[in-house]
């Protein structure tokens, strides 16, 4: 009797496992729909498709939106003096890093949306963005005296372009590749993931500085 009970329980467990596994497999191969729960400003922790975008493009954008929200949360209450603060003569201010994030996104727009080779853009564009892109001494000298709204507006203006352009593209575009990082094959997905993780890197630096601001 005991052996029969064990066999019955084992068979039931296996049958349930098969059903569960089949269900998971079916879910994993089912095309995700933009009708699933959407990420909003109130719920940044829903990573997935977004209305108005193809599935993978929307998922990428939702990740970027979450990261941008964290960056803004780090800096939104800082004064101009705090945004200009430099730990030493080799460091970058929080304000400069915020503008650097906008510059980075702008240059990746030119590269991926307009098909321009890196650094081939016009002198007018370079004049607007190169100091922030390069950081260093020029940024320490010139990116000063702005309130937080100035930086947030720049970030929003650039991100709005990204959203508009993402909406024009599909998942196949994300896979389009060319030699890029170290002349290695690099697809658009990798480039835009880099824009996101780049913000994560600088968000950590900005948090470090906020903990060391003068009282």
Image: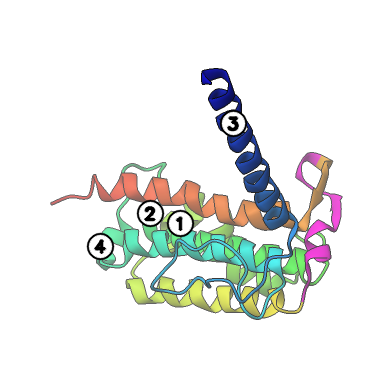
- Where does the image place residue 100, in percent across and percent down from the top left? 52, 59
Residue 156, x across and y down, in percent? 50, 76
Q: Which numbered disc covers residue 97?
A: 1
Image marks 4 and 3: residues in contact by CB distance under 8 Å: no
- Name the element at disc 4: helix
Residue placed under numbered mark 3 in the picture: 8
Question: Which numbered tag is attached to residue 93?
Answer: 2
Q: Secondary structure at mark 1?
A: helix
Height in image: 119 above or below 136? below
Seen from the viewer's position, the closer of residues 52 and 6 is 6
Instruction: Check contact, mark 1 vs mark 2: CB within 8 A.
Output: yes
| Mark 3–mark 1 CB contact (< 8 Å) | no
Q: Is residue 172 magenta?
A: yes
What number of labels is visible?
4
Tell me the crowding category of disc 4: few under 14, some 14 to 19, or many 20 or more residues within 10 angstroms, Cα based.
some
Q: CA distance from mark 3 to mark 1?
A: 63 Å
Q: Quadrant of residue 172?
A: bottom right
Task: Work out whether residue 192 or residue 209 is closer to the camera in this orientation and state it.
Answer: 192
Q: Earlier in the sequence, mark 1 or mark 4?
A: 4
């Amino acid at each position: 009797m005991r052996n029969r009970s064990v066999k019955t329980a084992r068979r039931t467990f296996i049958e349930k496992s098969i059903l569960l596994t089949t269900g998971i497999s079916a879910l994993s191969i089912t095309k995700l729909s933009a009708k699933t729960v959407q990420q909003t400003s109130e719920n940044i922790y829903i990573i997935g498709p977004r209305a108005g975008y193809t599935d993978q493009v929307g998922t990428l954008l939702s990740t970027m939106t979450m990261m941008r929200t964290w960056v803004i949360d780090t800096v939104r209450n800082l004064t101009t003096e705090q945004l200009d603060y430099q730990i030493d003569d080799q460091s970058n201010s929080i304000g400069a890093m915020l503008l650097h994030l906008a510059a980075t996104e702008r240059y990746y727009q030119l590269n991926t949306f307009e098909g321009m080779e890196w650094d081939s853009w016009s002198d007018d564009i370079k004049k607007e963005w190169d100091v922030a892109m390069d950081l260093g001494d020029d940024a320490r000298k010139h990116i000063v005296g702005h309130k937080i709204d100035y930086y947030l507006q720049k970030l929003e203006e650039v991100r709005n372009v990204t959203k508009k352009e993402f909406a024009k593209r599909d998942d196949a575009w994300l896979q389009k590749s060319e030699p890029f990082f170290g002349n290695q094959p690099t697809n658009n997905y990798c480039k835009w993931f880099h824009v996101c993780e780049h913000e994560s890197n600088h968000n950590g630096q900005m948090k470090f500085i906020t903990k060391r601001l003068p009282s």
